[in-house]
């Protein structure tokens, strides 16, 4: 599995602490691709771990990176509002 780079941690924290309408206006193609290809996959796996009681790989990675459960949930909600498939 993948590890959380500083770039990914920052993306998740930005999603957790931002208004999706403001983010959507400022997104360029690089950011959209990064969100769709990498961040959405991580957030989806994190969501599944939390809801399906899967072994906590991403939960642990988020905790180690200083991303709280509330920030994780907020990032998922923002990603959904941006149209990412988190399920």
Image (spheres, rainbow, N blue to C red):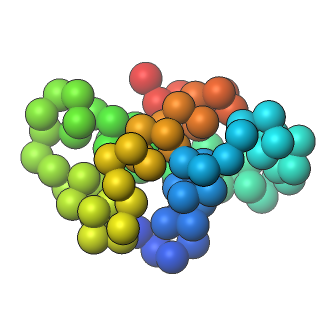
Q: Which quadrant of the figure has residue 36? A: top right
42 and 51: which is toward the camera: 51
Determine whether, in the image, residue 43 is placed left or right of residue 8.
left
Q: Quadrant of residue 3?
A: bottom left
**66 or 43: nearer the eye?**
66
Indicate the position of residue 18 as horizontal and vertical percent values.
67, 47
Along the horizontal axis of the image, is 48 left or right of 56? Answer: right
Residue 66 image offset from top left, x and y in percent: 36, 68
Total numbered labels placed on residues in the image: 0
Does any portion of residue 44 appear in the rendered image?
Answer: yes
Residue at the top extreme of this rendering: 87
Quarter of the image where the C terminus is located? top left
Front residue of 87 and 60: 60
Find residue 34 and report its horizontal and vertical position in percent.
Answer: 65, 55
Q: Is residue 68 left or right of residue 31?
A: left
Q: Quadrant of the N terminus?
A: bottom left
Judge by depth and name the residue closer to the eye, 26 or 44. 26
Residue 41 in view in this figure: no
Q: Residue at x 59, y 37 (%)?
A: 79
- Look at 54% across and 58% down and name the residue there: 13
- Residue 7 locus on image (x, y percent): 57, 72
Q: 34 above or below 82?
A: below
- On screen, 39 above or below 63? above
Residue plotted at (17% across, 28% down): 52
28 to the left or right of 56: right
């Amino acid at each position: 599995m993948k590890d959380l780079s500083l770039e990914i941690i920052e993306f998740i924290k930005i999603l957790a602490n931002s208004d999706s309408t403001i983010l959507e206006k400022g997104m360029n193609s690089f950011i959209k691709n990064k969100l769709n290809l990498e961040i959405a996959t991580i957030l989806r796996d994190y969501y599944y771990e939390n809801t399906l009681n899967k072994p906590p790989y991403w939960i642990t990675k988020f905790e180690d990176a200083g991303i709280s459960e509330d920030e994780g949930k907020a990032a998922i909600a923002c990603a959904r509002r941006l149209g990412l498939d988190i399920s």
